[in-house]
């Protein structure tokens, strides 16, 4: 749909490529503010065959009888769009040009009759045009009110002098345990009242505090209900009907019921907001000194009848009646909001202690009026004027916009009940989507809250970090070491998207799947942020039909975990994987060798690598009597033994996983087995061992013998601990598994992990490509390296600058000439312009720059430069033409 807002649309084009029909366009069509048109490309999909009269579907016939003219126009627009979309989507769909022309010409639902084909009848039955149209009208009217409701609540908080600090202190926890919409409403209103001298702690008394404290939760629920309805309406307006797949009538009824469920939730939220709006209006009116006016403003407003009306509509009513009832309640809410805003404006206007916001022209006039007459002085008896209290910056802008609309720019002489009623009527019209001023109001509120002025300093989400120059110097050094080790083993680099299709990630991580970050549905493919680099690697191998690949990847991954020391929601992983068919344990040996080389070269201190085999683990569970279907979930519990005691794990196994006490105790006895690899291997293979009676365990022990002998020959086995408690909870592991732990003072937990995953690629392609890999948890390694730097008390150089060109003046041309010669010679250099020598030396010392080139007036006259060895504090004067060669020689010797 090539459409704009309801107020500006002239023609709403239907059926074009990429076209969408919006709720605003449906609203404009319903009121005759726009006319429908069929895109020429869609027109070609319509049939010119003669009509074959069809019986009108019962829901459509009922809708024609019950809809008001505007509602009928909206339903006709929806039906026309559905017919055109379905014809364009399916070449076999028979939609006649005659039916489409009748609907487009009159935009009357009755004009569609008689329907000209069985397909048209099926589309009319399956698309539920009347219900969808009414839901679109509700959506169009509700969406802007979400912003308006926040702005009016903020204005009332000013008028009633409410406790903004207490009512809107709703921090977002970021861990899924706080309501996002509630926190967002609170944050937005705090921005609106920011700078106010009226709102404050304990302002307005207990009733005001209680009333305004409800605003974040109820306005948040309203936002949520509006968003949910909008998502479904958007789909129902623009999805073509798939003919012949399902019963058309049942499909239509299902759509109606779904819309009713969401509209009902919205109606309940609206009812709560109506009550809250009336309560706020009464609180505002209490601030008016005139008792008669106060009584008139509060006496005639009530929501007592609304609940009964709503229940009557929602119980035992058809979908069209329910949606019409919800729409009418929404209009009532619009009136209540308008009345509340008018009362709040009246209170502020009548209060002489409040400084009123003024437009630029008014400010200029007021400023002129306050100037004393020429030559006139203030009388001795004049008292110093009392400083007036100001509104918040956001509420000032909102008040000025509303006041200009209701007064048409004229001054307010006095406030009375008739004037407030007149304002309320005008504001109710302003809050109607057909009013161009509503878009300006909503955009203004959005602009204010997005300015985020209340929080001068921004912050980052929990579980994420910024890294300064010193930290980045450590990281770059570590990445360089890691990359060089990977390349030494012949690995090639790979990069994959930061987000994957949700279906790619689901079912690969066991119980940890709940930690996957899902992206909001933008109307396209359902996507999630990558949880690790292994599954994207397997997807890449499968998608490209690769039979063998040795690759490395260094990139960020995301997990919706609870942030804690050493545990983040965004962090780097450094992965090394080998995919393909090789001799037994050939790639496993190399991957573990890479891991030991990485940790040795990073020089982080003492570490150990715990190692186990998934088949051995499964064999152990089978020996203990665990049913095969519970292997993975029991492994997930065993995997927690590095963080919890066995008693805690046992409680989980028995209470949550349904494992018997005896079985859990037997598991506990076996998982205690750990020690040097070859010794534990001999223990598990000795005569009488239960593992030797288990086929899977025997196969695992045979593979481990090959691996341990290879590691022994490569002098890497001294870092390995054979540990039967290691489980690695991820579902895709099939063979050897391992995990590296730092043994130093810093408590960071696991620093690397990996294993064999022979079936993961096959999940995507059906062709099994065995693979094995390791992932270095680089964030924890960085934490260790940073701590080591602190303990050594060594200065970390954030740059690699070798020379500072110091111009004792402001001659950029001279600096450019000298520093360019250094850059062209491959020397890392910076330049600085200042007349003070001390500033140059201070910068060089802080940055750890070893050499300086000093040029002042005397050097320029002599055609020389001074080379300064910063650490030795010695200077050497050399000819200008020789300074680059001289520096190269001195740098090569250092």
Image (cartoon, rainbow, N blue to C red):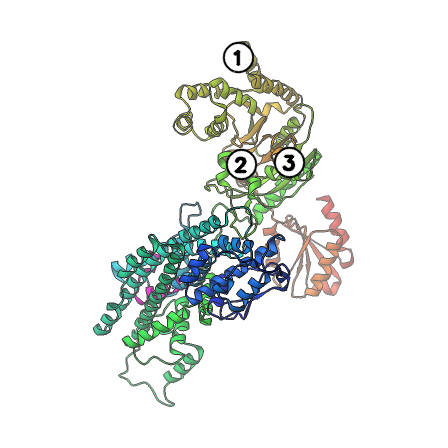
Quick check: 233 left or right of 758? left
Q: Residue furthest bottom?
A: 375
Q: Position of residue 259 (x, y in %)?
A: 43, 53
Using the image, tell me which numbered label, if any, was put on residue 507: 2
> Circle 3: is it few (<14), some (14-19), or many (20+) Cα within 10 Å?
some
Label 3 close to label 2 by CB (< 8 Å): no
Q: Bounds of the magenta span? A: 150-169
In the picture, which quadrant includes the C terminus? top right
Residue 833 seen anywhere in this rendered image of the structure: no
User: Residue 279 magenta-drawn?
Assistant: no
Q: Quadrant of residue 448?
A: bottom left
> Circle 1: is it few (<14), some (14-19), or many (20+) Cα within 10 Å?
few
Asked if 137 appears above or below 465 in the picture, the reply is below
Asked if 594 appears above or below 12 in the picture, the reply is above
Element assignment for label 2? loop
In the picture, which quadrant includes the N terminus? bottom right
Asked if 577 appears above or below 180 in the picture, the reply is above
- Disc 3 marks which residue? 765
Q: Position of residue 412 (x, y in %)?
A: 34, 79
Element assignment for label 1? loop
Tag nearer the camera, 2 or 1: 2
Counting residues from the start of the chain, the first of labels 1 and 3 encountered is: 1
Disc 3 and disc 2: Cα gap in Å?
15 Å
Asked if 783 appears above or below 217 in the picture, the reply is above
Image point 64% across, 40% down: which residue?
553
Image point 56% across, 25% down: which residue?
614
Using the image, tell me which numbered label, if any, was put on residue 689: 1
Which secondary structure class fits the magenta region best? helix
Q: Position of residue 26 (x, y in %)?
A: 49, 64
């Amino acid at each position: 749909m090539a459409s704009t807002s309801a107020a500006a649309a002239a023609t709403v084009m239907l059926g074009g490529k990429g076209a969408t029909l919006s709720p605003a366009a449906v609203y404009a069509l319903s009121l005759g503010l726009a006319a429908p048109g069929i895109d020429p490309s869609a027109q070609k999909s319509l049939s010119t065959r003669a009509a074959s009269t069809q019986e009108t579907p019962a829901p459509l016939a009922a809708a024609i009888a019950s809809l008001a003219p505007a509602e009928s126009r909206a339903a006709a627009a929806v039906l026309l769009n559905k017919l055109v979309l379905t014809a364009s989507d399916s070449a076999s769909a028979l939609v006649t040009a005659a039916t489409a022309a009748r609907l487009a010409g009159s935009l009357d639902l009755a004009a569609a009759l008689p329907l000209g084909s069985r397909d048209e009848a099926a589309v009319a039955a399956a698309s539920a045009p009347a219900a969808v149209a009414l839901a679109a009208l509700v959506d169009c009217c509700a969406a802007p009110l979400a912003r308006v409701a926040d702005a009016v609540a903020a204005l009332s908080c000013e008028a009633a002098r409410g406790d903004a600090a207490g009512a809107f202190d709703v921090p977002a926890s970021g861990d899924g345990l706080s309501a996002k919409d509630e926190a967002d409403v609170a944050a937005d209103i705090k921005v609106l009242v920011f700078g106010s001298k009226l709102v404050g702690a304990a302002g307005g008394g207990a009733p005001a505090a209680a009333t305004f404290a409800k605003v974040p939760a109820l306005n948040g629920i309203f936002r949520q209900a509006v968003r949910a309805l909008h998502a479904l309406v958007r789909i129902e307006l623009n999805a073509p009907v798939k003919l012949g797949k399902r019963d058309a009538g049942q499909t239509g009824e299902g759509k109606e019921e779904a819309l009713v469920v969401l509209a009902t939730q919205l109606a309940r939220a609206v009812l709560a907001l109506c009550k809250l709006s009336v309560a706020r209006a009464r609180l505002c009116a209490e601030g008016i000194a005139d008792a008669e006016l106060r009584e008139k403003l509060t006496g005639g407003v009530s929501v007592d009848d609304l609940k009964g009306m709503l229940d009557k509509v929602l119980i035992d009513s058809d979908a069209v009646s329910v949606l019409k009832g919800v729409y009418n309640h929404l209009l009532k809410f619009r009136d209540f909001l308008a009345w509340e805003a008018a009362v709040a404006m009246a209170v502020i206007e009548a209060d002489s202690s409040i400084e009123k916001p003024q437009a630029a022209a008014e400010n200029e006039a007021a400023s002129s009026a306050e100037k004393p007459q020429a030559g006139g002085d203030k009388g001795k008896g004049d008292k110093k004027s009392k400083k007036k209290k100001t509104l918040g910056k956001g509420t000032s802008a909102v008040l000025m916009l509303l006041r200009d609309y209701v007064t048409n720019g004229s001054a307010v002489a006095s406030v009375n009940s008739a004037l407030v009623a007149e304002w309320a009527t005008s504001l109710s019209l302003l809050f109607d989507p057909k009013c161009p001023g509503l878009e300006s109001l909503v955009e203004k509120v959005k602009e204010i809250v997005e300015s985020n002025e209340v929080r001068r300093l921004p912050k980052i989400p929990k579980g994420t970090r910024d890294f300064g120059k010193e930290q980045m110097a450590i990281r770059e050094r570590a990445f360089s070491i890691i990359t060089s080790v990977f390349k030494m083993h012949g690995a090639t680099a790979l990069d994959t998207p930061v987000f994957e299709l949700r279906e790619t990630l689901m079912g690969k991580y066991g119980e940890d799947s709940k930690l996957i970050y899902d992206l909001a549905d933008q109307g396209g493919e359902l996507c999630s942020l990558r949880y690790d680099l292994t599954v994207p690697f397997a997807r890449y191998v499968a998608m490209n039909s690769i039979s063998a690949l040795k690759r490395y990847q260094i990139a960020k991954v995301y997990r919706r975990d609870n942030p804690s020391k050493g545990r983040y929601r965004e962090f780097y992983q450094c992965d090394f994987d080998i995919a393909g068919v090789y001799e037994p344990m050939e790639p496993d040996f190399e991957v573990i060798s890479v891991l030991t080389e990485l940790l040795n070269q990073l020089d982080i201190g003492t570490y150990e690598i715990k190692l186990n085999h998934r088949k051995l683990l499964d064999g152990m569970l089978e020996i203990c009597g665990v049913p095969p279907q519970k292997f993975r979930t029991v492994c997930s519990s065993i995997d927690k033994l590095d963080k919890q005691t066995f008693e805690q794990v046992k409680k989980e196994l028995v209470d949550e996983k349904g494992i018997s006490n005896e079985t859990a105790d037997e598991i506990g006895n076996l998982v205690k087995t750990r020690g040097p690899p070859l010794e534990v291997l001999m223990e598990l293979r000795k005569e009488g061992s239960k593992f030797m009676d288990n086929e899977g365990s025997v196969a695992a022990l045979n593979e481990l013998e090959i691996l341990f002998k290879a590691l022994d020959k490569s002098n890497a086995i001294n870092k390995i601990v054979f540990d039967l408690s290691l489980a690695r909870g991820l579902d895709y592991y099939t063979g050897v598994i391992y995990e590296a732990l730092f043994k130093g003072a810093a408590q960071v937990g696991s620093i690397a992990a990996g294993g064999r995953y022979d079936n993961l690629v096959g999940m995507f392609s059906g062709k099994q490509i065995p693979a094995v890999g390791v992932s270095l948890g680089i964030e924890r390694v960085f934490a260790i390296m940073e701590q080591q730097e602190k303990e050594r008390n060594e200065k970390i150089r954030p740059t690699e600058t070798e020379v500072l060109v110091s111009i004792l003046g402001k001659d950029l041309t001279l600096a450019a000439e000298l520093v360019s010669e250094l850059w062209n010679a491959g020397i890392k250099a910076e330049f600085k312009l200042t007349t003070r020598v001390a500033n140059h030396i201070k910068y060089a010392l802080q940055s750890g720059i070893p050499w300086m080139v000093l040029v002042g007036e005397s050097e320029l006259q002599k055609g020389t430069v001074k080379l300064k060895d910063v650490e030795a504090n010695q200077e050497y004067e050399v000819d200008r033409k020789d300074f680059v060669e001289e520096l190269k020689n001195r740098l090569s010797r250092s």
